[in-house]
Image: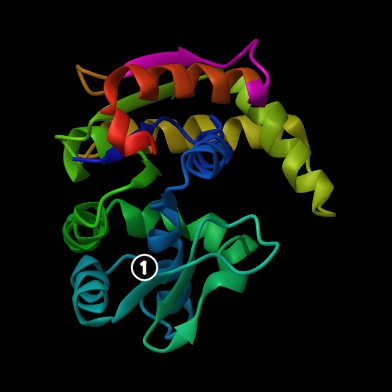
Amino acid sequence: MSVIAIDGPVASGKTVLGRRLAERLGWRALDTGVMYRALTWLALERGVNLQDETALTRLAEETRLKVGPPPPASSESATIIVDDQDATPHLRSSHVEASVSIVAAVPGVRRRMVQLQREEARQGRIVMMGRDIGTVVAEDAAVKIYLEASPEVRAQRRAAERCAAGATVKEASVLEELENRDRQDKKRDDSPLRPSKSAERLNTDDMSIEETVKAALRIAESRLPKEALL
């Protein structure tokens, strides 16, 4: 399958790497986390109780979710339309940020999202980023990469991103938030965060973005057939 799976914890650099890698290869890129974010936004808009797993599962199953090309000059990897509403501008809002881990942990929601993500994977020539791509969504992906970085480095990166966007944040608070998210992602029963046995692991603590992209390209070129790189 002409799929590159990039997994790793929050703020490990998956999205930036995935987009850069897709650009170099001329493939599509999809940060699967935005699908969970879009559903979270819709749930908040409709006043769905986020503690009601049945209601969230029903929402996921009944919602028409469409993945399209990213908006011009956007940092997102895709446009996400839910029930004819463009959720893309709202994906990084503070309300969604605070609630997405709750929605993403619901087994029924994950099953529906995995189904939709597999449909995207079947189209081929795509770099997919998430937490369960190599282990669940695309187990037969040609290339699997697991990004790692220490919580402290990831907190520095995430805090810098938010400051650049105009927010006032404390790095210690971001670190606590990331560590809580790590625990939730690793301990959930459905699709927990863990590296695939066949994944190449990259620790990016001391690597620049360009160094990470070059390392990922070397991995991709060693595993993909030549025709996939044309």
Tell me the residue at 19%/63% (across/down): 112
Rendered view: 15 above or below 56: above
Q: Residue 24: image x %, image y %?
A: 53, 38
**Which range is magenta?**
200-210
Residue 153 or 126: which is nearer the viewer? Answer: 126
Q: Residue 142: image x %, image y %?
A: 23, 31
Tell me the residue at 66%/36% (across/down): 174
66 sits to left or right of 170 = left
Circle 1 is placed at which residue position? 50
Which quadrant of the view contains residue 186? top left
Q: Residue 25: image x %, image y %?
A: 46, 39
Q: Residue furthest top?
A: 206
Residue 138 or 53: which is nearer the viewer? Answer: 138
46 sits to left or right of 119 = right
Tell me if I can see residue 161 in this picture. yes
In magenta stretch: residue 118: no
Q: Residue 202: image x %, image y %?
A: 46, 15
Judge the density around disc 1: few (<14), some (14-19), many (≥20) Cα neighbours within 10 Å: some
